[in-house]
Amino acid sequence: MNECILNLAPKGIWEEFHGILGVPRPSKREAKMVAYLEKWAKDHKVDYIKEECGNIIMNVPATPGMEDRQTIILQAHMDMVCEKNNDKVHDFENDPIEAVIKGEWVHANGTTLGADDGMGVAGALAVIADPTVEHGPLECIFTIDEETGLTGAEKLDPKDFKGRILLNLDSEDEGEIFIGCAGGMDTIIKMWYELEPKPENATAYRVTVSGLKGGHSGDDINKNLANANKLLNRILFQATTWYDLALYDFQGGNLRNAIAREATAVAYIPNDCIEGFLAYVKKAEADFRQEYQVTEPNLKVTAEVAEIQPDVVIDEMSQYELLNALYACPHGVIAMSQTIPNFVETSTNLASVKRKEGFFFIQTSQRSSIESSKEDVANMVASVFNLADADVEHTDGYPGWTPNPNSVICDIAVKCYKERFNKDPKVKAIHAGLECGLIGDKIPGMDMISFGPTLRGVHSPDERCEIKTVQMFWDFMCDILKNAPKK
């Protein structure tokens, strides 16, 4: 399995990525990946530290003639976002990822690929394994749980490494060097409900919004992608007034840092309203497809008789509060930067809505490159649900990464890129969160950049890696290491 990628160049990275694809590594459940990296270090006779939280730090001596260079940290996260298509049977805790080549891209078969950040891990391992790569002392840091909490970066012990120059290998646009990122936090909501008997002379229907692209709630939030939770709620909100809809279930989205791709609800419709309701759902699909005709060509809305006809529905007041709050909850870009052209400054994502026993669990995430704006938009979300008498809490969040205009390693990277590819790279900040923010907060003065090969559709089953950019990523990384500053 996955042998198709072994013929790709550069051979070293693809061989390492091939090994990584076979190791389950969901966020917060990375034990198998930790064990894999420990065995890899032992097999390659590399000294390493395993931190209490599970982070692995490999210490690599300089190659001959490079002993006078400053220590460089190569940093990547070992966990991956686990998303799959509804019709795909896959156990992320036990099954390997199945890679397929489609034209100029490597995809996965119905799941996320895990190139975020498996490519970063593979790149660092390939550097260690290749004796022809010239480099000074290296510290290769592989962190846990970046995707759902930045836990590894938060628990990284500064005493376990000495380097003060860091190359973060977790970006998704070849030709771009990132020197700053947004900070983020989550706002978590519980909306309580009671159950009451189902209405008489009514039939339960399952309404589903599907076929959306989804995507990363940082990188893709400004691309006018549809949010399945918002679209489904629009249908339910209007149908409550027009067709006396009675809601039983709402399940939409999965991950805090992904735009919801699919959402489904089960609701009772009075039998004498079914014809009108079904026509309305068809009209809603047509409206949505017109609204998102460019960005969501595969958008689909269906309404079918539910396979199970439940005996109960949620109480009328709870339904009213839920649908109104979800309608009012902001989603998308809140503000663009006034200083960086075309850069999202502040955003929020209505990530998931899940019916639990006795309450609906709603997860949202906020990002901003300005700390006060991050808190402001989080309070904006909270205020909507406070009006519905919900339980609301904010997570501690993570800091942003302020660009350093005097970065030595950025100057070196820009020079290396121009010499290698005969063109200027783009130096910019990113709206997504990176571990650099936390690491820089722990160690003020850490000189950092982030870069990587081109990935698209991350955090969704459409995730893919552009093959030709992996060679460029490798050459660029090796050039930076070869030109590391002297001590």
Image: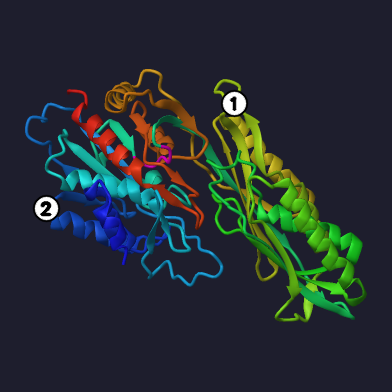
Residue 80's spot in the image, x, y percent? 42, 55
Residue 136's spot in the image, x, y percent? 16, 33
Disc ID at residue 386: none
Residue 260's spot in the image, x, y percent? 61, 54
Q: Main secondary structure of the magenta part?
A: loop
Mark 1: amino acid: Ser
- What stretch of residues is rendered in magenta? 169-173
Disc ID at residue 45: 2
Residue at 27 percent of width and 27 percent of height: 420
Most distant residue in the top direction: 406
How far apart are the two marked residues, 1 and 2, measured between alpha carbons?
A: 48 Å
Residue at 44 percent of width and 70 percent of height: 91
Residue at 27 percent of width and 59 percent of height: 19
Whether residue 475 sits left or right of residue 196 in the image: it is left
Q: Quadrant of the N terminus?
A: bottom left
Q: Which residue is mark 1?
A: 337
Q: Secondary structure at mark 1?
A: loop
Whether residue 421 sits left or right of residue 39 in the image: it is right
User: Considering only vertical position in the picture, is 178 above or below 264?
Assistant: above
Nearer to me, 23 or 52: 23
Can I make out residue 360 in this image?
yes
Most distant residue in the right direction: 272
Mark 2: amino acid: Lys
Q: Quadrant of residue 72?
A: top left
Mark 1 or mark 2: whose residue is earlier in sequence: 2
User: Considering only vertical position in the picture, is 26 above or below 55?
Assistant: below
Most distant residue in the left direction: 64
38 within the magenta span = no
User: Considering only vertical position in the picture, is 43 above or below 176?
Assistant: below
